[in-house]
Image (spheres, helix red, strand yellow):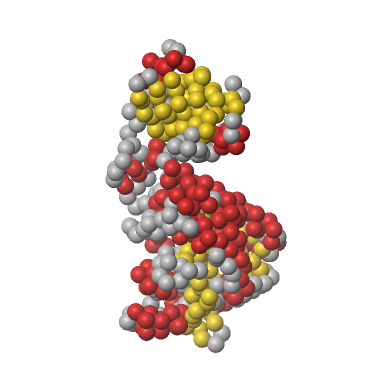
Amino acid sequence: MQFISIQEALKKNKGTVEVRGWIKRKREISDTVFVLLRDSTTEMQCVIEKEKIGEVWKELQHTGIESSIELKGELKEDKRAPNGLELRVNELKIIGISDKFPISRDLSEEFLLDVRHLWLRSSKMTALNKIRSTILFAVREYYQKEGWFEVSPAIITPNACEGETTLFGFDYFGEKRYLSQSAQMYLEVMIFSLEKVWGLTPSFRAEKSKTARHLTEYWHLEGEAAWMDMHEMMNEIEKLVEFVCHRVAEKNAKELLSLGRKPEEIKAIKAPFKRISYDEALKKLEKEFNKKIKWGIDLSIKEEKKLGEKEKTPFFIYGYPTAIKAFYAKEMPEDSNKCFSFDLIAPEGFGEVCTGGQREDVIENMVEKLKKEKLPLKNYEWYLDLRRYGSVPHSGFGLGIERIMRWICKQESIKDTIPFPRTMNRSYP
């Protein structure tokens, strides 16, 4: 047989075709079986009559959903079929029998996580993973167009980048080492030769959090650029997000609709994004939501949600208090209590999806901050070298692929935006 995809078969519209895939649904009426066949491209109704397939009929009767089969038949118009066409089968070969598939309707989230290896076959997860693929490709397409270099930072590290309380530590041949929280420091190394770099790597956070937007292992898109200040980096990020949104709207309209998201909502995302200061955010929370936040406190998930609920486009909050940001955040010269740091907040109440800012480039300031936070200087000597030898102003960011997917795909939980979610209670399968 010369197999083609179901999508290619539907485009032919008529004639004899050979397709293969998995049985999504099966219904038997007398001597006829109706099968909804799926492959990676789409679905097609197939009509299988006993008299046409001979001895295979008995085997077909005992073949359940998710069995894999090969079919040959004639395409015929039928308005009742999902795509207006059905396949009248002349030849059938059963490849892999599925007896009783364990997934049915109305099962709990925990059970579906237990059988994630099977749930990934569902229409919902297939749509999400197609959109994820588009996003990852669009990121590379954008940065190649803009002249940034993709690099491969280390995952095993001696350093804490985002504070020591969320590190996954392990014994590394007798030395204490950690899984990376962020590739930022290694990306900073690369700007002194390549100037504008980015990487897409897994990051690990030992956060005991059960919120709808936290994972212990996630895919982290990060970038660093020499000669850029905070505002220039925000310019870069909003252009990237716009590009990614437009690619998804163009390539995955069907998938977006199946997930409850109108493609035109994502297509409407355009830079520049609105920018408000941390101070302005506090004033807005107090004025519009009667929520008074003491200056110097980080914004919670609930507060980010309130600020973004009525927005249709992502927006930036910048100028956060220095005390709540990492040691490498550069202080504002006019007010050392504030730093050149920002968050990108997704609209519709989805909260923060990206954080970044301008990095401290003066070695004396960096040493002072490390000492203040009681971090061992010897572990950061290599990082301090970047300030000793030809330091330059520079900025960077980190964007969670799963977080931006959660917003784009309008998902309640971040767990559905990654094939195999890892949380504080789950590392299986």
Q: Number of callouts in the render?
A: 0
Could you tell me residue 227's position as x and y percent?
67, 72
The answer to which of 321 and 103 lies nearer the viewer is 103
Can the viewer see residue 134? yes
Residue 47, horizontal then vertical, whole percent: 45, 26
Looking at the image, residue 39 sits to the left or right of residue 199; the answer is left
Residue 292 on image: x %, y %: 33, 82
Taking 236 as reference, is 111 above or below it? above
Residue 296: quarter of image:
bottom left
Q: Nearer the viewer, residue 277 or 255?
A: 255
At 50% from the left edge and 83% from the top edge, which residue is drawn?
336
Residue 344: tell me if it is visible: no
- Residues 326 and 13: in front is 13
Which residue shows up at 45% across the image and 49% down it?
258
Determine the residue positioned at 54% across, 23% down. Answer: 72
Q: For the view shown, which residue lies furthest in the top direction?
A: 55
Residue 99, by quadrant, is top left
- The residue depicted at 35 percent of the width and 70 percent of the height is 302
Q: Considering only vertical position in the picture, is 263 above or below 330?
A: above
Assign the C terminus to one quadrant of the image. Answer: top left
- Quarter holding the N terminus is top right
Residue 330: which quarter of the image? Answer: bottom right
Q: Position of residue 135 (x, y in %)?
A: 56, 53
